[in-house]
Image: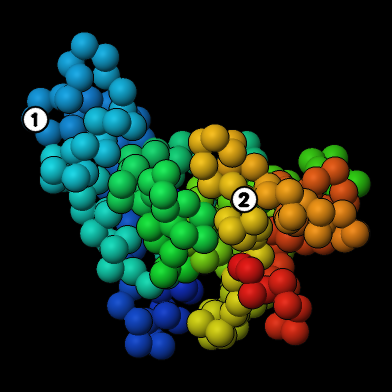
């Protein structure tokens, strides 16, 4: 949005990454008037099953046959060409704004971004990196485990694991700008400077750690459940595998907001 703090954050990334020699392409969804809803209009030509419109099946078939609408294809081309994708947004209702959710729903189609055989660390986009960069209306303490909003790691799990990592992205720690609307100009300027500094070393950052798919029985018969030997190995561990795979244990500290130290062997599983 013109004149917003999110626009300023985007501009810092655009300028810094361009200075580093990267070609940066911006999809300004509001300026593009990007359509958020998944509809029949996303499919060019006849449906595979005109009696019952199932968006997932029809969009996958259309992707295979080159029959997706032009706006979806254009965004998929951008993803294909990208080494790294940054999602810049204000946090709405503990998630992304509707227009960005619509981008995820329409662009990350089955076949293009994932399949039953290509999920998580074996996902279709596993050679690319992605991260969330967002502003909040809340102060940081509100998103602590004992804060009124609850643990930010839990808030981020559906987006970072259920969308980005699900498609194979190597997910970098999020860039969170806490309550910029309630901060004085000097603090907002410091936030932007901190973002610029981080961008200068972003290429060397390690991704967040997620449970490796090899620990699961990846068959319908096996229910995609944790393998018995993996479960037995975890019994002696003080923490769960990840924020979502807690196994009834304490959540691994800051699993969704900080990469594990380089000397931690578990980062090999990320």
Rendered image: mark on residue 188: none
- Corner quadrant of residue 194: bottom right
Rendered image: mark on residue 216: 2
The quarter of the image holding the C terminus is bottom right
Instruction: Report x, y in % for residue 60.
Output: 27, 39
Q: Give the secondary structure at mark 1.
A: loop
Q: Looking at the image, tell me whether mark 2 or mark 1 is earlier in sequence order.
A: 1
Say whether residue 188 is left or right of residue 82: right
> Are circles 2 and 1 on residues that touch, CB within 8 Å?
no
Q: Is residue 25 above or below residue 252?
A: below
Please give the name of the residue rendered at 23% of the width and 59% of the height, measured from the top-left corner. 77
Please give the name of the residue rendered at 28% of the width and 68% of the height, measured from the top-left corner. 81
| Residue that badge 1 annotates | 45
Instruction: Report x, y in % for residue 86.
Output: 46, 63
Residue sticking out furthest to the bottom: 20
Q: Between 42 and 147, which is closer to the camera in this rendering? A: 42
Say whether residue 106 is left or right of residue 193: left
Q: Between 92 and 53, which is closer to the camera in this rendering? A: 53
Please give the name of the residue rendered at 42% of the width and 44% of the height, measured from the top-left corner. 116
Please give the name of the residue rendered at 33% of the width and 69% of the height, measured from the top-left corner. 82
- Which mark is nearer the camera, 2 or 1? 2
């Amino acid at each position: 949005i013109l004149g917003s703090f999110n626009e300023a954050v985007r501009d810092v990334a655009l300028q810094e990454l361009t200075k580093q020699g990267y070609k940066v392409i911006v999809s300004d969804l509001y300026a593009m008037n990007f359509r958020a809803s998944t509809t029949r209009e996303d499919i060019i030509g006849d449906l595979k099953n005109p009696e019952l419109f199932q968006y997932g099946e029809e969009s996958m078939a259309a992707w295979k046959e080159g029959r997706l609408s032009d706006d979806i294809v254009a965004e998929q081309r951008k993803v294909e060409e990208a080494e790294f994708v940054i999602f810049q947004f204000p946090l709405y209702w503990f998630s992304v704004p509707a227009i960005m959710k619509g981008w995820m729903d329409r662009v990350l189609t089955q076949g293009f971004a994932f399949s039953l055989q290509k999920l998580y660390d074996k996902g279709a986009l596993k050679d690319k990196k992605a991260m969330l960069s967002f502003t909040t209306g809340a102060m940081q303490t509100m998103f602590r485990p004992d804060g009124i909003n609850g643990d930010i790691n839990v808030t981020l799990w559906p987006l970072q694991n259920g969308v980005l990592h699900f498609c194979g992205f190597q997910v970098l720690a999020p860039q969170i700008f806490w309550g910029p609307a309630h901060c004085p100009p000097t603090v907002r300027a410091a936030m932007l400077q901190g973002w610029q500094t981080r961008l200068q070393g972003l290429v060397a950052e390690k991704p967040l750690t997620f449970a490796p798919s090899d620990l699961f029985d990846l068959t319908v018969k096996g229910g995609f459940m944790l393998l018995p030997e993996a479960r037995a190995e975890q019994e002696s561990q003080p923490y769960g595998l990840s924020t979502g795979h807690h196994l009834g244990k304490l959540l691994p500290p800051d699993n969704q907001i900080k990469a594990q130290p380089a000397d931690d062997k578990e980062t090999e599983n990320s």
